[in-house]
Image: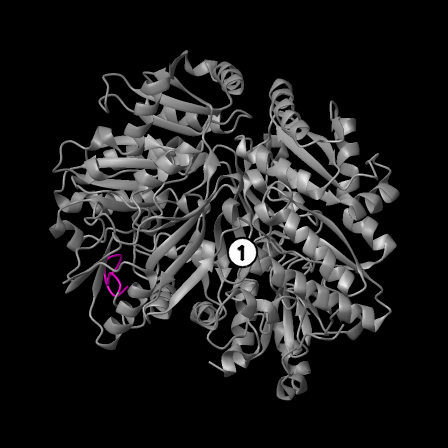
């Protein structure tokens, strides 16, 4: 069965009906990321597709509210029309996951998905200031609001962002937005090893001219030579000045080529959407979040156990890793290496068989798991929202 | 003022005071870490919301996470309420004790544990003061961004409890945007590590939930914070206007032009006069409104950005422009603003409100605040962060006149209701505490409050931690 509520009231009424004879529900936006998480079986799917459109946009306040079924592309076009943008550069995983459809705002919020600018401007959860949602009791509720400074009550916005649809049905999201930079320029250092590249990126982030993004594409990841990319954004004169100062302070790492305009934009879209690792499709994809300076050494540890192709973003703090599916796609050594560095690893792309066997989300400690189970129950006592998608029993 | 109710103390707990104190002494290494002498307890009776005070049973100042864990496990087992405390600078009564509670203060846990410039993180004990973090990382060329006015005294633990902001959060965000991980002692004494040096940990965002939870989910003993490289320089421009409307429109146009200054501070005429009389900063006392707009970067970058801002201000009929060209001029411009609360305290007693509004409603809200306060026969001065709409109306009154005090409290409540009515919220950075607890029904529906309370009870089913705060007292009985 498939539900497509067309209004908030309709969604809440539907949930109240469903709760009377609880039956699990899969929540879906554009359906472009449905292969992330544990495979789940539900009798019904609830799509947010018909809950679309902008409910408030105040460019002078840098605030926008949209219904969660709104395509991300539509929201970004609206903001671009007023010279603004979502600060966190939401990624598009259609190529990576081999999916079709339109990524929606609700999906981005449910996954707390952020792209390269996360390192400077924060994650989706940092820009998200308000939500309207229906909980598992069919109650239509609000968290946060439309003002960017708000500490009134428990911050349920943070809890819902990144909950992968397991706590509530999200109806409307309000974001703090930023002006689009007037100019953007990428410094590209060629031929660095992973170690050298991570050292360079961490050094760059500590200068008074910090890049808005820092990524490393090793040899073979979309080019014959390794490329280390630092992106500067802002007013034109300022970007030119910062690029000079940054290049000078990093001169010990070699000379930097400058990439601008369309070519620079394409390059960062490729990093954002993990394009260099899309093929071969049968490979599993892991996403490791690490303390940035531990990026290269963590990959070296994993490589001692199995071969893989990688892509570094967030100055080394985000490692995308492609490896064969055999032996649980390396779950044990990959998770051990990530944990040893103080990070965690998520299995983003794998066959349903593997995702049923290997927990796609990095498993929490027993005490934290108990808190999470309690939170799930506080929102969704009957367990109807995406049950088991994140973890068995949650 | 006596309008805010406290939960009735439990006589059985009060009767067991000496036994509880003795057992607490056995749980901590330093016997002086437990305070029960009435004279020594006096400083802990209240926080910066001084209109209310209650002496606690005792105060414990543990020196380690393990001691906090032992103390909490014991108190929870005995059913004794716990009031967590940092430096006691809360403006909303968030750290005011209950008579049958034990205050657990983290002020002794104030060490820097690790600074990692390459990761742009620092791991610190939560009792460290806000400013001490910046001082510790300064030698590496870094700073800790959230900067509440009380940053010399307030602790990170308190900043996390209230999700504190500051003057520079327009660009750098508030505490939650600069906090990567916490060590949290749960009410049963279990210690959990949430988040850490890596971004976006798996599972529900418990770090985000704990930040701003006002000490009701556990006690934070350590934290990993994001540190940022210090910019090359920063300079403000002072802009005066003949009306609040013009100043408000100027703010909107600055942001509309794609400029995000690090700070946009707003003062109205009463605030200008009070600050000028106190500090002699050279503010134009005839102006209706004054903006201080600060930008960062190299000298050339600052010049270019200030020129853009001044051009916008001219379109809105700016009457005075003072662009800082040196550190001395910068200090002079900020001098009046930074002394605002102290200067106001010299002319009258005041309560400082903290609502946030959509910035487009600014002129209308300022006019209505004036009407509200005049309606009670009182005066108001407005000083606030204009870029993000976080207002700080200072309602002036005489603390020795009970009638005026009650009127000031009522005027404050009306102002906060107005903030909610225009689409804003009750508190932008000070927290709910006891001060705004009974106004929560104006911002949230009953179902919304019950949803929040249900999440709180996952962490603390018996409501041992900081009870009587944030949630209206009648919420539970009527549930």
For this view, does A234 lie left or right of residue B145?
left
For this view, does B372 lie left or right of residue B13?
right
Q: Is residue A353 above or below residue A169?
A: above
Q: Nearer the viewer, residue A12 or A114?
A: A12
State how many labels appear. 1
Q: Nearer the viewer, residue B206 or B442?
A: B442
Based on the displayed image, in which of its 4 quarters is residue B371 positioned? Answer: bottom right
Q: Secondary structure at mark 1?
A: loop
- The span picked out in magenta is A385-394
Q: Position of residue B331 (x, y in %)?
A: 77, 33
Q: In this rendering, does residue B353 appear at all?
A: yes
Q: Position of residue A305 (x, y in %)?
A: 21, 37
Q: In this rendering, does residue A308 appear at all?
A: no
Q: Is residue A34 above or below residue A385?
A: above
Chain letter of the residue carrying label 1: B
Characterize the magenta stretch by its predominant secondary structure: loop
Disc 1: CA contacts within 10 A as few (<14), some (14-19) or many (>=20)? some
Q: Position of residue B145 (x, y in %)?
A: 59, 40
Based on the displayed image, in which of its 4 quarters is residue B329 positioned? Answer: top right
Whether residue A393 is in magenta: the answer is yes
The residue tagged 1 is B423
Q: Residue at x 41, y 54 (%)?
A: B205
Based on the displayed image, in which of its 4 quarters is residue B437 positioned? Answer: bottom right
Whether residue A335 is in magenta: the answer is no
Q: Is residue B380 above or below residue B17?
A: above
Q: Residue at x 29, y 43 (%)?
A: A71
Q: Residue at x 56, y 55 (%)?
A: B424
């Amino acid at each position: 069965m498939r539900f497509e509520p067309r209004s908030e009231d309709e969604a809440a009424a539907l949930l109240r009906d469903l709760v009377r004879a609880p039956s699990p529900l899969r929540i879906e936006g554009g359906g472009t990321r449905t292969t992330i998480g544990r495979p789940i079986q539900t009798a019904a799917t609830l799509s947010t597709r018909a809950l679309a459109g902008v409910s408030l946009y105040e460019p002078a306040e840098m605030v926008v509210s949209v219904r969660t079924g709104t395509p991300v592309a539509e929201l970004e076009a609206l903001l671009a029309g007023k010279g603004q943008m979502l600060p966190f550069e939401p990624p598009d995983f259609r190529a990576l996951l081999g999916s079709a459809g339109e990524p929606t705002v609700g999906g981005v919020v449910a996954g707390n998905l952020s792209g390269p600018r996360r390192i400077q401007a924060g994650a989706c959860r940092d820009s998200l200031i308000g939500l309207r949602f229906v909980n598992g009791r069919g109650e239509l509720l609000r968290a946060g609001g439309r003002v960017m400074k708000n500490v009134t009550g428990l911050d349920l916005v943070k809890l819902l962002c990144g909950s992968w649809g397991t706590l509530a049905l999200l109806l409307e999201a309000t974001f703090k937005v930023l002006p689009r930079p007037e100019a953007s320029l990428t410094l590209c250092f060629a031929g660095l090893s992973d170690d050298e590249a991570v050292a360079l990126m961490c050094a760059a982030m500590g200068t008074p001219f910090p890049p808005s993004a820092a990524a490393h594409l090793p040899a073979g990841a979309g080019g014959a030579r390794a490329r280390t990319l630092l992106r500067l954004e802002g007013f034109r004169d300022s970007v030119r000045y910062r690029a000079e100062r940054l290049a000078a302070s990093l001169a010990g790492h070699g000379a930097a080529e400058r990439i601008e305009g369309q070519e620079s934009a394409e390059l960062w879209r490729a990093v954002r959407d993990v394009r260099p690792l899309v093929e071969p499709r049968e490979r599993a994809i892991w996403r490791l979040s690490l303390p940035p300076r531990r990026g290269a050494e963590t990959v070296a540890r994993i490589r001692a156990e199995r071969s893989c192709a990688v892509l570094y973003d967030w100055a080394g703090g985000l490692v995308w890793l492609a490896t064969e599916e055999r032996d649980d796609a390396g779950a044990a050594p990959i998770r051990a290496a990530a944990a040893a560095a103080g990070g965690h690893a998520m299995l983003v792309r794998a066959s349903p068989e593997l995702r049923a066997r290997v927990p796609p989300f990095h498993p929490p400690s027993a005490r934290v798991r108990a808190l999470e189970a309690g939170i799930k129950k506080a929102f969704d006592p009957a367990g109807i929202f995406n049950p088991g998608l994140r973890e068995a029993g949650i | 003022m006596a309008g805010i109710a406290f939960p009735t103390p439990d006589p059985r707990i009060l009767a067991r005071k000496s036994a509880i104190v003795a057992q607490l002494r056995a749980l901590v290494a330093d016997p002086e870490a437990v305070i029960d002498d009435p004279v020594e307890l006096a400083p802990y009776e209240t926080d910066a919301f001084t209109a209310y005070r209650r002496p606690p049973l005792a105060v414990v100042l543990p020196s380690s996470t393990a001691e906090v864990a032992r103390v909490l496990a014991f108190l929870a087992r005995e059913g004794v309420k716990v009031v967590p405390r940092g430096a006691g600078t809360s403006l909303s009564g968030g750290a005011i004790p209950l008579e049958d509670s034990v205050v657990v203060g983290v002020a002794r846990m104030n060490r820097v544990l690790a600074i990692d410039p390459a990761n742009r993180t620092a791991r610190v004990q939560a009792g460290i003061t806000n400013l001490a973090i910046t001082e510790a990382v300064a030698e590496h060329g870094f700073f800790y961004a959230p900067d509440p006015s009380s940053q010399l005294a307030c602790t990170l633990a308190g900043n996390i409890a209230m999700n504190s902001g500051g003057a520079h959060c327009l660009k750098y965000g508030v505490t939650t945007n600069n906090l990567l991980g916490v060590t949290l002692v749960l009410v049963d004494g279990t210690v959990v590590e949430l988040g850490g040096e890596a971004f976006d940990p798996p599972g529900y965002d418990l770090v985000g939930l704990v930040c701003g939870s006002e000490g009701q989910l556990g006690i934070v003993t350590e934290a990993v914070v994001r540190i940022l490289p210090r910019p090359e320089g920063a300079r403000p421009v002072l802009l005066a206007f003949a009306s609040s409307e013009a100043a408000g429109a100027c703010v909107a146009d600055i942001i509309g032009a794609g400029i995000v200054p690090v700070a946009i501070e707003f003062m109205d005429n009463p605030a200008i006069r009070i600050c000028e009389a106190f500090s002699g900063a050279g503010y134009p006392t005839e102006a209706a409104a004054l903006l201080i707009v600060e930008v960062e970067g190299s000298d050339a970058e600052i010049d270019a950005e200030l020129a853009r801002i001044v051009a916008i201000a001219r379109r809105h009929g700016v009457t005075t422009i003072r662009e800082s060209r040196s550190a001395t001029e910068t200090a002079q411009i900020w001098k009046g603003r930074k002394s605002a609360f102290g200067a106001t305290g010299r002319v009258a007693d005041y309560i400082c409100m903290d609502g946030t509004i959509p910035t487009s409603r600014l002129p209308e809200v300022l006019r209505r605040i004036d009407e509200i306060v005049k309606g009670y026969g009182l005066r108001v001065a407005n000083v606030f962060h204009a870029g993000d709409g976080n207002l700080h109306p200072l309602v002036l009154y005489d603390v020795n006149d009970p009638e005026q005090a009650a009127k000031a409290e009522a005027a404050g409540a009306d102002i906060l209701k107005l903030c909610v009515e225009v689409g804003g919220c009750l508190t932008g950075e000070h927290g709910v505490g006891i001060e705004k607890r009974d106004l929560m029904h104006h911002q949230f529906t009953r179902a919304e409050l019950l949803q929040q309370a249900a999440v709180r009870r996952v962490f603390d089913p018996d409501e041992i931690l900081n009870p009587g705060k944030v949630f209206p007292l009648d919420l539970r009985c009527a549930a």
